[in-house]
């Protein structure tokens, strides 16, 4: 992914993920996952992660809800939403 995308800022609606990345020792039960995150972070020299409340990112929230409703594996990495995923209504 780092070869194709220059973005080094990542947003999440999960405050726990941010806490885990900032202080991995406090989350020892996730040490395996956090070591993988640390390895990936090394690919992004200016890596930053920040909290985005769900209410402020309706498109990502709708995309996640649609993916969960598929009840099968859904793998997609990209910069745009595929046309076959319904877009949330604009408010």
Image (tube, helix red, strand yellow):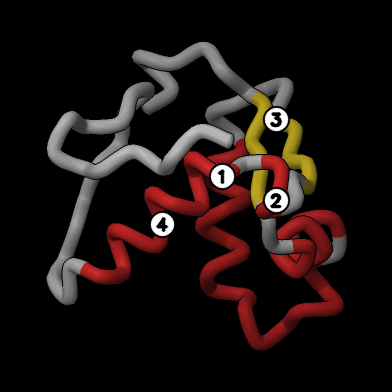
Q: Tag 3 or tag 4, which sits nearer the N-term? A: 3
Residue at the spot of label 3: 47
Q: Residue at x 26, y 43 (%)?
A: 86
Quadrant in the rendering for residue 30: bottom right
SS under mark 2:
helix
Mark 2 or 3: in front is: 2
Q: Residue furthest bottom?
A: 29
Label 3, residues with CA under 10 Å away: few <14, some 14-19, many ≥20: few
Q: On the picture, is 1 further left or further right than 18?
A: left
According to the picture, the residue beneath numbered tag 1 turns out to be 58
Answer with mark 2 or mark 3, whichever residue precedes in sequence. Answer: 3
The percent coordinates of residue 24 (x first, y second) are: 78, 67
Q: Position of residue 31 (x, y in %)?
A: 63, 75
CA–CA distance between discs 2 and 1? 6 Å
Question: Of the residues under marks 1 and 4, which one precedes in the sequence?
Answer: 1
**Real-space CA distance between mark 2 and mark 4, rounded to the nearest whole angstrom:** 13 Å
């Amino acid at each position: 992914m780092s070869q194709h995308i220059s973005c080094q800022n990542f947003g999440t609606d999960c405050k726990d993920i941010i806490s885990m990345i900032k202080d991995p020792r406090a989350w020892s039960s996730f040490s395996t996952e956090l070591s993988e995150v640390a390895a990936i972070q090394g690919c992004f020299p200016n890596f930053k992660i920040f909290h985005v409340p769900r209410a402020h990112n309706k498109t990502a929230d709708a995309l996640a809800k649609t993916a969960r409703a598929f009840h099968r594996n859904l793998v997609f990495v990209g910069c745009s939403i595929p046309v076959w995923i319904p877009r949330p209504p604009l408010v």
